Amino acid sequence: MRVYDKSIQELLNSGRSRAAQEAAGTSDKLLSLHMGKDKLMKHLERLDKELNHLVRDRSYLNRSVNKCQLKIYNEIKNPLEIYSEKTKHEGFMISNQSQEIFPMPSRVQKISDIWASVQKYCFENHLFYQNCHTGIFLPDQMLMDLLTIPPTTRISSQNIQTLLRDHITLLTDDNLGLVLDTAGYKLMTTIEPSSSWAVNTSIGHTFICGFRTMKRKYPENFVLMKRITVSRYHEKHIIP
Protein backbone atom coordinates (compact mmCIF):
# COMPACT_ATOMS: atom_id res chain seq x y z
CA MET A 1 0.00 0.00 0.00
CA ARG A 2 2.82 2.40 0.81
CA VAL A 3 4.43 1.63 -2.55
CA TYR A 4 1.27 2.71 -4.37
CA ASP A 5 0.99 5.92 -2.32
CA LYS A 6 4.63 6.76 -2.91
CA SER A 7 4.37 6.20 -6.68
CA ILE A 8 1.22 8.33 -6.93
CA GLN A 9 2.82 11.15 -4.94
CA GLU A 10 5.94 11.08 -7.11
CA LEU A 11 3.87 11.44 -10.28
CA LEU A 12 1.88 14.32 -8.80
CA ASN A 13 5.09 16.09 -7.71
CA SER A 14 6.97 15.52 -10.96
CA GLY A 15 6.80 19.27 -11.77
CA ARG A 16 5.84 18.71 -15.40
CA SER A 17 3.32 20.86 -17.24
CA ARG A 18 -0.10 19.40 -17.97
CA ALA A 19 0.83 18.96 -21.65
CA ALA A 20 4.08 17.20 -20.69
CA GLN A 21 2.24 14.95 -18.26
CA GLU A 22 -0.30 14.02 -20.94
CA ALA A 23 2.49 13.30 -23.39
CA ALA A 24 4.23 11.07 -20.86
CA GLY A 25 1.00 9.22 -20.12
CA THR A 26 0.93 10.41 -16.50
CA SER A 27 -2.88 10.30 -16.32
CA ASP A 28 -2.98 6.70 -17.44
CA LYS A 29 -0.27 5.78 -14.94
CA LEU A 30 -2.14 7.53 -12.11
CA LEU A 31 -5.36 5.76 -13.07
CA SER A 32 -3.55 2.41 -13.16
CA LEU A 33 -1.97 3.06 -9.74
CA HIS A 34 -5.32 4.07 -8.20
CA MET A 35 -6.98 0.98 -9.63
CA GLY A 36 -4.18 -1.20 -8.30
CA LYS A 37 -4.47 0.45 -4.90
CA ASP A 38 -8.26 -0.08 -4.81
CA LYS A 39 -7.85 -3.72 -5.81
CA LEU A 40 -5.25 -4.28 -3.10
CA MET A 41 -7.46 -2.61 -0.47
CA LYS A 42 -10.39 -4.85 -1.38
CA HIS A 43 -8.12 -7.91 -1.20
CA LEU A 44 -6.85 -6.87 2.24
CA GLU A 45 -10.40 -6.29 3.46
CA ARG A 46 -11.39 -9.79 2.30
CA LEU A 47 -8.36 -11.32 4.05
CA ASP A 48 -9.21 -9.40 7.21
CA LYS A 49 -12.76 -10.80 7.17
CA GLU A 50 -11.47 -14.34 6.61
CA LEU A 51 -9.02 -13.92 9.47
CA ASN A 52 -11.80 -12.76 11.79
CA HIS A 53 -13.86 -15.81 10.83
CA LEU A 54 -10.90 -18.08 11.57
CA VAL A 55 -10.37 -16.46 14.98
CA ARG A 56 -14.04 -16.93 15.85
CA ASP A 57 -13.99 -20.53 14.63
CA ARG A 58 -10.89 -21.26 16.67
CA SER A 59 -12.42 -19.71 19.79
CA TYR A 60 -15.54 -21.82 19.28
CA LEU A 61 -13.44 -24.94 18.78
CA ASN A 62 -11.47 -24.25 21.96
CA ARG A 63 -14.68 -23.78 23.92
CA SER A 64 -16.10 -26.99 22.45
CA VAL A 65 -12.96 -29.00 23.24
CA ASN A 66 -13.02 -27.79 26.83
CA LYS A 67 -16.59 -29.05 27.16
CA CYS A 68 -15.83 -32.64 26.20
CA GLN A 69 -17.18 -35.10 28.73
CA LEU A 70 -16.06 -38.63 29.46
CA LYS A 71 -18.13 -41.05 31.50
CA ILE A 72 -16.85 -44.42 32.70
CA TYR A 73 -18.97 -47.23 34.14
CA ASN A 74 -17.36 -49.84 36.37
CA GLU A 75 -18.99 -53.25 35.95
CA ILE A 76 -16.13 -55.35 37.31
CA LYS A 77 -15.99 -56.68 40.86
CA ASN A 78 -12.93 -54.63 41.85
CA PRO A 79 -12.58 -50.91 42.56
CA LEU A 80 -11.44 -49.33 39.29
CA GLU A 81 -8.57 -46.84 39.42
CA ILE A 82 -8.58 -44.08 36.80
CA TYR A 83 -5.30 -42.35 35.96
CA SER A 84 -4.68 -39.37 33.73
CA GLU A 85 -1.77 -40.15 31.40
CA LYS A 86 0.28 -36.96 30.85
CA THR A 87 3.17 -38.63 29.03
CA LYS A 88 3.25 -41.64 26.73
CA HIS A 89 3.87 -44.98 28.41
CA GLU A 90 7.03 -45.91 26.53
CA GLY A 91 10.77 -46.07 26.99
CA PHE A 92 12.88 -47.52 29.80
CA MET A 93 13.04 -47.22 33.57
CA ILE A 94 16.59 -46.85 34.94
CA SER A 95 17.77 -48.37 38.20
CA ASN A 96 18.86 -46.10 41.06
CA GLN A 97 22.31 -47.70 41.03
CA SER A 98 22.82 -46.74 37.38
CA GLN A 99 21.62 -43.20 37.98
CA GLU A 100 24.28 -42.76 40.64
CA ILE A 101 26.96 -43.39 38.00
CA PHE A 102 25.43 -42.07 34.79
CA PRO A 103 23.77 -38.63 34.66
CA MET A 104 20.28 -39.54 33.43
CA PRO A 105 16.69 -39.40 34.70
CA SER A 106 14.82 -42.39 36.07
CA ARG A 107 12.94 -42.74 32.79
CA VAL A 108 14.29 -42.34 29.25
CA GLN A 109 12.69 -42.77 25.84
CA LYS A 110 15.39 -44.55 23.83
CA ILE A 111 18.49 -46.72 24.24
CA SER A 112 20.42 -43.97 22.46
CA ASP A 113 19.65 -41.67 25.43
CA ILE A 114 21.19 -44.24 27.77
CA TRP A 115 24.21 -44.70 25.51
CA ALA A 116 24.80 -40.94 25.45
CA SER A 117 25.08 -40.91 29.26
CA VAL A 118 27.38 -43.94 29.26
CA GLN A 119 29.59 -42.31 26.61
CA LYS A 120 29.81 -39.12 28.67
CA TYR A 121 31.00 -41.08 31.69
CA CYS A 122 33.57 -43.00 29.62
CA PHE A 123 34.91 -39.83 27.99
CA GLU A 124 35.22 -38.01 31.30
CA ASN A 125 37.16 -40.95 32.75
CA HIS A 126 39.27 -41.61 29.62
CA LEU A 127 38.11 -45.21 29.20
CA PHE A 128 38.93 -45.34 25.50
CA TYR A 129 39.68 -48.54 23.66
CA GLN A 130 42.75 -47.77 21.50
CA ASN A 131 41.73 -44.09 21.04
CA CYS A 132 38.84 -41.66 21.50
CA HIS A 133 37.56 -42.12 17.93
CA THR A 134 36.63 -45.81 18.01
CA GLY A 135 33.38 -45.39 19.95
CA ILE A 136 34.44 -48.37 22.04
CA PHE A 137 35.39 -48.26 25.72
CA LEU A 138 36.93 -50.44 28.42
CA PRO A 139 35.40 -50.50 31.93
CA ASP A 140 36.92 -49.06 35.07
CA GLN A 141 36.33 -50.68 38.45
CA MET A 142 32.99 -48.89 38.95
CA LEU A 143 31.61 -50.18 35.64
CA MET A 144 32.97 -53.68 36.29
CA ASP A 145 31.11 -53.75 39.61
CA LEU A 146 27.91 -52.32 38.16
CA LEU A 147 27.75 -54.50 35.06
CA THR A 148 29.50 -57.54 36.54
CA ILE A 149 31.97 -57.78 33.66
CA PRO A 150 35.74 -58.46 33.36
CA PRO A 151 38.19 -55.63 32.58
CA THR A 152 38.65 -56.80 28.97
CA THR A 153 34.98 -56.31 28.04
CA ARG A 154 34.53 -53.83 25.22
CA ILE A 155 31.60 -51.48 25.73
CA SER A 156 29.87 -50.03 22.68
CA SER A 157 26.49 -48.94 21.38
CA GLN A 158 26.05 -52.47 20.02
CA ASN A 159 26.08 -54.22 23.40
CA ILE A 160 25.14 -51.56 25.95
CA GLN A 161 21.51 -52.73 26.22
CA THR A 162 22.68 -56.28 26.92
CA LEU A 163 25.26 -55.14 29.47
CA LEU A 164 22.67 -53.02 31.30
CA ARG A 165 19.93 -55.66 31.19
CA ASP A 166 19.76 -55.85 35.01
CA HIS A 167 19.49 -52.07 35.32
CA ILE A 168 16.97 -51.06 32.67
CA THR A 169 13.36 -52.13 32.27
CA LEU A 170 11.39 -51.81 29.05
CA LEU A 171 8.03 -50.25 29.88
CA THR A 172 5.01 -52.29 28.80
CA ASP A 173 1.35 -52.56 29.79
CA ASP A 174 2.32 -55.47 32.03
CA ASN A 175 4.51 -53.33 34.32
CA LEU A 176 2.44 -50.14 34.50
CA GLY A 177 2.89 -50.24 38.28
CA LEU A 178 6.41 -48.85 37.72
CA VAL A 179 5.17 -45.52 36.42
CA LEU A 180 1.67 -44.91 37.81
CA ASP A 181 3.08 -43.14 40.85
CA THR A 182 5.43 -40.90 38.84
CA ALA A 183 4.86 -37.35 37.62
CA GLY A 184 3.62 -38.58 34.23
CA TYR A 185 0.43 -39.99 35.76
CA LYS A 186 -2.23 -38.67 38.12
CA LEU A 187 -4.80 -40.73 40.01
CA MET A 188 -8.11 -39.06 39.17
CA THR A 189 -10.51 -41.28 41.11
CA THR A 190 -11.40 -44.81 42.15
CA ILE A 191 -14.78 -46.04 40.89
CA GLU A 192 -16.48 -48.56 43.11
CA PRO A 193 -18.18 -51.60 41.50
CA SER A 194 -21.54 -50.84 39.84
CA SER A 195 -20.77 -47.12 39.92
CA SER A 196 -19.78 -44.52 37.35
CA TRP A 197 -17.66 -41.37 37.09
CA ALA A 198 -17.76 -38.41 34.73
CA VAL A 199 -15.14 -35.79 33.99
CA ASN A 200 -14.81 -32.75 31.74
CA THR A 201 -11.78 -33.21 29.54
CA SER A 202 -10.40 -32.51 26.07
CA ILE A 203 -10.02 -34.45 22.84
CA GLY A 204 -6.76 -36.37 22.73
CA HIS A 205 -6.46 -36.78 26.51
CA THR A 206 -5.67 -40.34 27.63
CA PHE A 207 -6.93 -42.18 30.71
CA ILE A 208 -5.75 -45.47 32.18
CA CYS A 209 -8.36 -47.79 33.72
CA GLY A 210 -7.36 -50.76 35.86
CA PHE A 211 -7.12 -52.31 39.29
CA ARG A 212 -4.53 -53.63 41.73
CA THR A 213 -4.31 -57.32 42.50
CA MET A 214 -2.57 -59.37 45.18
CA LYS A 215 -2.20 -62.28 42.76
CA ARG A 216 0.72 -60.62 40.97
CA LYS A 217 4.00 -59.26 42.25
CA TYR A 218 5.01 -55.62 41.86
CA PRO A 219 5.33 -54.03 39.31
CA GLU A 220 2.97 -56.39 37.46
CA ASN A 221 0.26 -56.05 40.10
CA PHE A 222 -1.71 -53.43 38.13
CA VAL A 223 -4.17 -55.02 35.69
CA LEU A 224 -4.87 -52.73 32.75
CA MET A 225 -8.52 -52.97 31.74
CA LYS A 226 -8.65 -50.20 29.15
CA ARG A 227 -6.67 -47.23 27.83
CA ILE A 228 -9.07 -44.50 26.70
CA THR A 229 -7.99 -41.68 24.38
CA VAL A 230 -10.86 -39.20 24.09
CA SER A 231 -11.91 -38.70 20.47
CA ARG A 232 -15.49 -37.38 20.74
CA TYR A 233 -17.24 -34.57 22.59
CA HIS A 234 -19.36 -37.01 24.60
CA GLU A 235 -17.95 -40.45 25.32
CA LYS A 236 -19.17 -43.31 27.45
CA HIS A 237 -17.12 -46.41 28.25
CA ILE A 238 -18.22 -49.51 30.10
CA ILE A 239 -15.50 -51.54 31.80
CA PRO A 240 -16.95 -55.07 31.86
Image: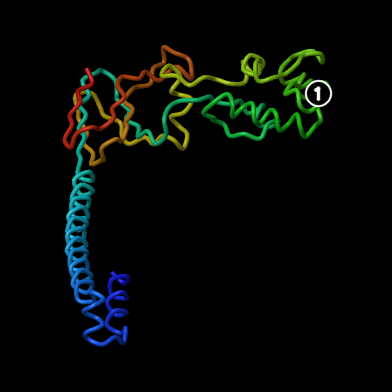
Is residue 120 found left or right of 206 in the rendered image?
A: right
Image quarter hosting the N terminus: bottom left
Q: Position of residue 12 (x, y in %)?
A: 27, 82
- For the residue pair 112 and 221, the one nearer the viewer reads as 112
Residue that label 1 marks: 140
Q: Secondary structure at mark 1?
A: loop
Q: Residues within 10 Å of mark 1 (few under 14, many from 20)?
A: some
Image quarter hosting the C terminus: top left
Q: Position of residue 16 (x, y in %)?
A: 29, 85
Q: Position of residue 23 (x, y in %)?
A: 23, 78
Q: Residue at x 20, y 32 (%)?
A: 71
- For the residue pair 188 and 79, the one nearer the viewer reads as 188
Q: Position of residue 154 (x, y in %)?
A: 75, 16
Quick check: 206 above or below 168?
below
Q: Residue at x 32, y 32 (%)?
A: 206
Quick check: 133 above or below 31?
above
Quarter of the image for residue 105 reads top right
Quarter of the image for residue 195 reads top left
Quarter of the image for residue 47 reads bottom left
- For the residue pair 133 and 212, the one nearer the viewer reads as 133
Q: Residue at x 20, y 52 (%)?
A: 54
Is residue 196 found left or right of 102 in the rendered image?
A: left
- For the residue pair 212 and 162, the one nearer the viewer reads as 162
Q: Residue at x 68, y 32 (%)?
A: 100
Instruction: Say how the picture is coloured.
Output: rainbow
Counting the numbered discs, the total is 1
Quick check: 95 above or below 200?
above
